[in-house]
Amino acid sequence: MTRYQGLATSTVVATLVLITIGAVVRTTGSGLGCPDWPLCHGELLPPAERTAIIEYTHRSAAAIVGLMVLLTVAITMWRHRKDHTLRNLAMAAVPLLAFQAWIGKETVERGLPPAVVTLHLAMALVLFGVLTLIAVFSFLGPERRLSANRERLRFLRLAIGVSTVVIGVLLAGSYVVGADATTACLTWPGCSQAPVPFFDGLREQHIHWFHRLSVLAGLGGVILLIWRAQELPNTDTILRIGTWALGGLYAIQIMVGAANIWTDFSSAVRAVHLAGSAVICGLCVLIIAGAAYYAGHHTSADKFSRLASDPENKSA
């Protein structure tokens, strides 16, 4: 791993940690722990209150991640500006970072409206996806090649479609939290408060049911993606492994969602559930990039791909 690859990977991991801290802020009701921005209760340091400290930790982590993103962008523009894809992704990361910071400010100043909270998470996932692509392309190398294989292109289109559905599921789950509909259903997989979706219950139950049914749609898409991945040539072993990993993570995410009810909506479980959404989003990006490009001839990713698909090389 080169230093640039290490920095790009570290920035992705740090962003994932930031999203996890943001999940803790939401699940502990600390979103207004600091009711002003960028100060906290008019001071540089937060008061000795639990919600203020949690929210201030999130802001501090966001500042650190912001610096890491800017450093990644600077080195990309300095050392890899001839790589047009990397350069364009780096240029996109800067306005995304600025917009995300502005949305964070608006979220606090507007009193955490569900739509703005959901937009805040959506932009976080977009920025996370862009940073993940930068890391992936740094490993694929400047000599990476666009796929021209017909089967692989069909798989790519399916992967984009399934990923769109899955990310929609994640955002629907975020809206459930923002709309205070998390506890609208107290049983799983059914909902005793509204047994018939969209007919029984109130608005909160309808929101909750929409998320649950969208989860099933996403699961169907993931299963289809796994099935289609098995039909790819032997050289695409990594893609097959990636889709199985996505299926496993998605199944775990469903069970963690159910564990919210089983644990009486534990803050820790809810935070894990939200953080898992970001991991799934990142894996979707990896699968799409892996389907769209072949690694360059001189990258470690290309060597690994050849080893994974050639038993003779393994024995050698």
Image (cartoon, rainbow, N blue to C red):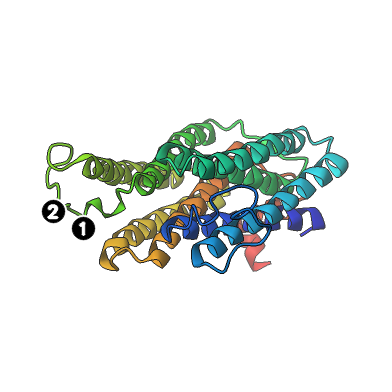
Q: Residue at x 49, y 39 (%)?
A: 110
* Residue at the limit of the structure toward the front, as seen here: 42
Element carrying mark 2: loop
The residue to which callout 2 is attached is: 192
Q: Residues within 10 Å of mark 2 (few under 14, many from 20)?
A: some
* Residue at the limit of the structure toward the right, as seen here: 78
| Callouts 2 and 1 close, C-beta under 8 Å | yes
Q: Amino acid at mark 2?
A: Ser
Element carrying mark 1: loop
Q: Amino acid at mark 1?
A: Leu
Residue nearer the viewer, 233 or 199: 199
In the picture, the quarter occupied by the N terminus is bottom right
Q: Is residue 29 visible?
A: yes
Q: Is residue 159 left or right of residue 47?
A: left
Q: Position of residue 233 (x, y in %)?
A: 52, 44
Q: Position of residue 80 (x, y in %)?
A: 83, 41
In the picture, the quarter occupied by the C terminus is bottom right
Q: Is residue 254 above or below residue 222?
A: below
